[in-house]
Image (cartoon, rainbow, N blue to C red):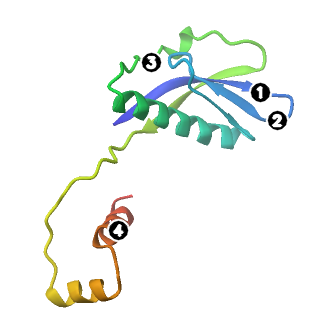
Amino acid sequence: MECVYPALFCANDDGSYTITYPDLPGCLSEGKSLENAVYMAQTALSQWIKYLADKKLEIPNPSIIQSIKVQNGEFVSLIRAEIKDEHAVKRTVSIPKWMDDKAIESRLSLSRVLQDALREKLV
């Protein structure tokens, strides 16, 4: 699931930024630089929406960016976040017996190896 929300960036005297989301009261973050602030804004948005979804709480619609009032030293930017469902699912896979024997001998977690391999291929 992807979501895009307007975030309000407020420049601080030390060059850092404070980020708030007008549509998500309580969702805020900070970044040491503008680049870091954008990254932190994405992280905060992802975690906030995931929390609301996990708790089955209402996820508000994002405001139109032009409707957000800014003060001196502030600007609004759209922030995109991808929310991934991290719940485990059970799958049946088949591997040759010799691989299973070697995996057991090496104390490998087949789930972890499969997740790592899929992550490398898909991300």
Name the kind of residue labelled 1 in the image. Ala
Q: Is residue 113 above or below residue 25?
A: below
**Are the residues at dot 4 and dot 2 in contact (C-beta closer than 8 Å)?**
no
Marks 3,2: beta carbons within 8 A = no
Secondary structure beneath dot 4 equals: helix
Disc 4 marks a residue whose amino acid type is Arg
First of labels 3, 4 by sequence position: 3
Cβ atoms at labels 3 and 4 below 8 Å apart: no
Query: Seen in the image, is 66 located left or right of residue 70?
Result: left
Say which element carries label 2.
loop
The type of residue carrying mark 3 is Pro
Q: Could you tell which of marks 1 and 3 lies nearer the N-terminus?
A: 1
Per the rendering, the mark at residue 11 is 1
Real-space Cα separation, disc 3 to disc 2, in angstroms:
28 Å
Q: Where is residue 74 in the image (x, y as percent from the top left)?
A: 72, 20
Quadrant for residue 102, please give it: bottom left
Q: Residue at x 34, y 69 (%)?
A: 117
Q: Name the residue under label 2.
A: 15
Residue contact between numbered discs 2 and 1, judged by CB atoms under 8 Å: yes
Q: What's the distance in space between the residues labelled 1 and 3, CA to CA?
A: 23 Å
Real-space Cα distance between discs 2 and 1?
A: 7 Å
